[in-house]
Amino acid sequence: MKPAETPMLAATDQPFPSAVELVLRRYAALVDARGASAIGFEAAVKAMAPATKAAITADLKCYLAWCGRRRPVVKAVPAEPETLVHYLHWLAKGSEARRSAKPATLARRIASIARVHRILGFGEKEPLPTQAGMVRDTLKGIRRDKRQRQRQAAPLRLGEEMIEGQEAPEGVTIEALLASCGSDIIGLRDAALISLAYDAGLRVSELVASEVADLRQVGDGSGRLGIAHSKTDQLGEGALAWLSPETMGHISAWLLASGIGEGPVFRRINVLTSPPDPAGQQIVRHYIGAKPLTRQGVVAILRCRVLEAIDLGHVELDPGMEGDTVRALSAHSFRVGLTQDLFAAGEDGAGIALALRWSSPTTALRYARELAVGSNAAARVLGNLRRGSISPKNDCQAIDGDCASG
């Protein structure tokens, strides 16, 4: 296939093309962009959240590269439904150098391809190839074969019972992580970060974007955090999150010790250690950066604190479970943990979704599925009616007897 001349997708007054356009230009021979509107393309890209734009760029690069390697080379946009079916099977199969894609990843890849088709002017008068029955059936078939629920981040709950009679959550908790933070400058930062992330139920993008000007304290000692932008607030209408007096104390201690009076609240700390002097003493100096922490930095801090909490005995785990425990946690775990704690305290999905800026109560409920089962209508009504008169010990004996006789 001979390379085609790439039309200018972005408006001519834009000094730098977007990442999406750069990918399309690179694979111009595979893309029919003749029907694209420069103004419409620019508007669509600007409307994307940064995370969405990054995901679409990565998905598009993978798809276009695959189309270019096919023999014969296939047209990527507009795509034939058969092409998308082959692409899904290729993703799902994997190889020695590439892990097989999960159903959630496949669905996202198809959604990205559909989005690019619309941006380039397809789908207004004719159905998109991603909507073809064979594409939908292929996704369903792969999902059925794998039968895999999308893995969620493990929750980081507070560590206390939410209502009387409940057992406090076990494993890694916010209280255990805070107990692992010392009084040094790094410990003060980490304690403030952990406490703020939990109280406000922050997404990692909201956490790293927090600035000193966004914080204020009120008369009862609690605080408020202004959230300028979030995943579900791309227009920048803003939101406020409540912070406990304890969290405000952690934040005040960190800001005072670090001397930060404006700009990003959470920053990287560089540690420089001098060579030992004749007496064997070393001088340790801490240098606080000017830029905010990255997403990767937040995850590194979390994992470091989890291991520290385990070493100090604040977390009890079965032998050999340390690695799995650390891998199950992510920066999203703070948000999931607070969602579960609020459900455990009896709050409804609508109130939780509003407080934590979830897109819908259904989304919040998905992260508290197991807790919700214990407090749903059947559990509330039948819990008191069907307590039974057999003690746990007798129950076990009866079950053992049934198994022995069967």
Image (tube, grey):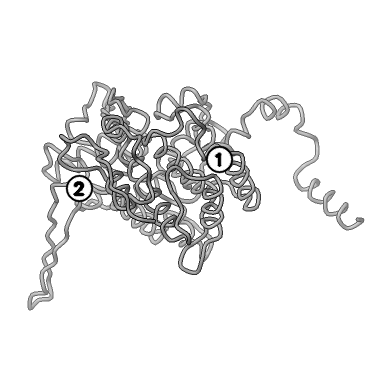
Give the left or right position of residue 151, taking residue 229 as reference: right
Residue 91 % position (x, y): 51, 56
Q: Amino acid at mark 2?
A: Arg
In which quadrant of the rendered view does residue 14 lie?
A: top left
Give the left or right position of residue 168, taking residue 21 as reference: right
Residue at the farthest front position: 2
The disc at residue 246 is none
Q: Which residue is mark 2?
A: 267
41 to 204, vertically: above or below: above
Q: Which residue is mark 1?
A: 167
Q: Amino acid at mark 1?
A: Glu
224 to 49, vertically: above or below: above
Viewer-side residue, 390 vs 275: 275
Residue lying at 56% horizontally and 60% vertically, measured from the top left: 93
In which quadrant of the rendered view does residue 175 lie?
A: top left
Give SS at disc 1: loop
Residue lying at 22% horizontally and 43% vertically, measured from the top left: 17
